[in-house]
Amino acid sequence: MSDCKPLEEARQRKDRIVADYRDVADQAATCLDEGFESATGVMQLPAGLRPYMRTNNHLERLNREIKRRTRVIGVFPNTDAAVRMAGSVLIEQNRLAQARKAIFSEETYRKLM
């Protein structure tokens, strides 16, 4: 279903899957039927935003980078030192993100409205 371009095509595919598997796996079919709209909310976004918004890979990568940097230090003298280290990683990653192509441009915001 996630390969479908238009949302309506994904809904049709979901309906076929639910109908085919209702007898075999009723709970799974019900779960798919009830959770479909929230699971496919990203498909309502403009096509350019979908790859970025459909996963949390960017957040996982950021968390791994913070973890990698904090492991080098080992033991922090206090909580403030740990917060400063994490903050410096976030500032650096933000600076790098600013240099990359903008995900949310003015044109993208207009499409969302």
Image: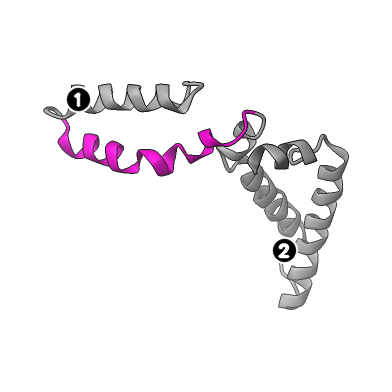
Q: Position of residue 108 (x, y in %)?
A: 72, 37
Q: Is residue 106 above or below residue 63?
A: above
Crowd band around label 1 with a 10 angstrom C-alpha radius: few (<14), some (14–19), many (20+): few
For label 2, the residue is 74
Q: Which residue sits furthest left?
A: 23
Q: Which residues are magenta?
A: 25-47
* Residue type (three-letter) at the residue carrying disc 1: Ala
Crowd band around label 2 with a 10 angstrom C-alpha radius: few (<14), some (14–19), many (20+): few
Nearest-to-viewer mark from 1 and 2: 1
Q: Is residue 36 magenta?
A: yes
Observer-nearest residue: 62 or 104? 104
Using the rendered view, name the quadrant where residue 37 is placed: top left
* Residue type (three-letter) at the residue carrying disc 2: Gly
Magenta residues: mostly which secondary structure?
helix
Using the rendered view, name the quadrant where residue 67 is placed: bottom right
Please state if 51 lies on the left or on the right of 28 as rendered.
right
The answer to the question of whether label 1 and label 2 lie on touching residues, with beta carbons closer than 8 A, is: no
Please state if 16 lies on the left or on the right of 25 as rendered.
right
**What numbered label is drawn on residue 29?**
none
Q: Name the residue at 64% across, 41% down.
A: 112
Observer-nearest residue: 43 or 75? 43
Q: Name the residue at 62% across, 46% down.
A: 60
